[in-house]
Image (tube, grey):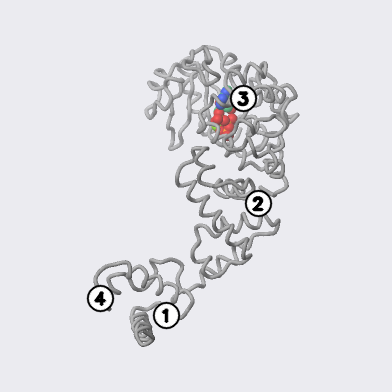
Amino acid sequence: MNEKFRQALPIIETLKRHGHEAYFVGGAVRDFLLDRPIGDVDIATSALPQEVISLFPKTVPVGIEHGTVMVIYKGTSYEVTTFRTEGRYEDYRRPAEVTFVRSLEEDLKRRDFTMNAIAMNERGELIDPFGGKAALEKQLIETVGAAAERFSEDALRMMRALRFVSQLGFSLAVDTKQAIEQHGHLLEKIAIERITVEFEKMLCGPFVHQAFPLLIETNLFLYLPGLSEKKEPLAKMSAYQWRRLHDRIEAWALFVYLLDVDPHSFLRKWKLPNHVIRDVSVCLQGLTEIREKDDWTIDRLYRYGQKYMPLIETVRATLKDESAATDELAARLAALPIQERKQLAVNGNDVMAWFGRERGRWIAETLETIERAVLHGEVKNEKEAIKEWLLACNQKQEKNC
Ligand code: ATP
Ligand code: MG
């Protein structure tokens, strides 16, 4: 058994000692069987939330209405969820209410895909009533039960199917794929934020080149924010080496660049957080500048700095299918006299004192002039040197007038 499960064993043992059933479930079991790195270890139990709370000293009722209690044990948090079914589904979304049940199998039955419906007990034995292990061996994503029904219950599962294709490189089972083709319109019922979570995981997956064609083949793209008119660029997405990218900002930046859309309005449709929209936009601006001039000048290196340069360079290199020169650029950046404005040896107060003038726009302008001169090595980044240089500049300018 994997170390992560072993660490969580005492939780299962405590529940069992008190007469409850308890199993490892969900993504961790799937990833363990696939020999992939294991994420959060989740536990399903017959104990009711209040019973779970009473058995452990440190708990947080994170989703108690859905039966989930977070148990904090030796510094790690575990979601412990009561066996449940999802009751009535309303409006193709998650059900308004859940019903707690006493059987594991009932709980596994409400899960989305067979590979996600495998439980493992404290001895490492699998409880796999829907053939999840066989699906893993065949590398197939198939719904638990009739696909059409399962996607009608919760349309988000269609997006989850594509993100698992991208994360695992698996194929969609024939009926699962057909049901997606027929039920894509139901995505319109789902909160954008939930779609975005899955879509972003898809964009960042190592097999996203397999997921893009499915977006088109299943027509799901028609129901995604800002994509319904973008069949052509979507069809070309798979030509790029998305695996070269490291994070969500780079993935969204490449996606938006290839779609050729305005980043702000497009990303707002996906309801991404403002800081993500800002970072992607800065990245795209840098990318556009650098691709036009095909050069990282000193000014651009400095402007985009250690925060954005690696992102821009990675996406630039991915677009050109060449290796990123991030290390070399980082060395160039480090060798510049300054890397950011706050390293300047002078500030607005200094400048004001030297000229004895009132506050105004001129201060910012002067600081910009100094910054440029220091950056390009025209003057040393030392207070006295800058003062002398600035006063000399000023005299020259006055003479010119
Ligand atoms: P990851 O490793 O990315 O967390 P995961 O499979 O654990 O993948 P989660 O979103 O954490 O995905 O969900 C945990 C489990 O809950 C899933 O494995 C699945 O059994 C079940 N599940 C999650 N979302 C749904 C859904 N929309 N419908 C049915 N079951 C779901
Ligand atoms: Mg998970």
- What is the quadrant of the N terminus in the image? top right
* Label 2: which secondary element: helix
- Disc assigned to residue 353: 4
As drawn, is 199 to the left or to the right of 19?
right
Q: CA distance from mark 3 to mark 1?
A: 63 Å
Residue 129 is situated, as x and y percent measured from the top left of the image, at 66, 17
Could you say where residue 382 lies in the image, as x and y percent from the top left?
37, 78
Task: Say which label, 1 or 4, has the lower sequence index.
Answer: 4
**Gap in angstroms between the C-alphas marked 1 and 4:** 20 Å
Q: CA distance from mark 2 to mark 1?
A: 39 Å
Which mark's residue is nearer the viewer, 2 or 3?
Answer: 3
Three-letter amino acid code of the residue under disc 2: Arg
User: Where in the figure is residue 131, as x and y percent of width and height?
Assistant: 70, 21
Neighbours of disc 4 within 10 Å: few (<14), some (14-19), many (20+): few
User: Where does label 1 land, which residue?
Assistant: 380
* Relative side of 347 to 197, left or right: left
Q: Amino acid at mark 4?
A: Ala
Q: Earlier in the sequence, mark 3 or mark 1?
A: 3
Q: CB under 8 Å between callouts 4 and 3? A: no
Q: Quadrant of residue 344?
A: bottom left
The numbered mark at residue 185 is 3
- Residues marked 3 and 1 touching at CB (< 8 Å): no
| Occupied quadrant, residue 326 | bottom right
SS for dot 1: loop
Is residue 25 something one can see in this rendering? no
> Is the CB of mark 1 within 8 Å of ligand 1?
no
Compare marks 2 and 1 and give the one earlier in the sequence: 2
Q: Quadrant of the C terminus?
A: bottom left
Earlier in the chain: of badge 4 and badge 3, it is 3
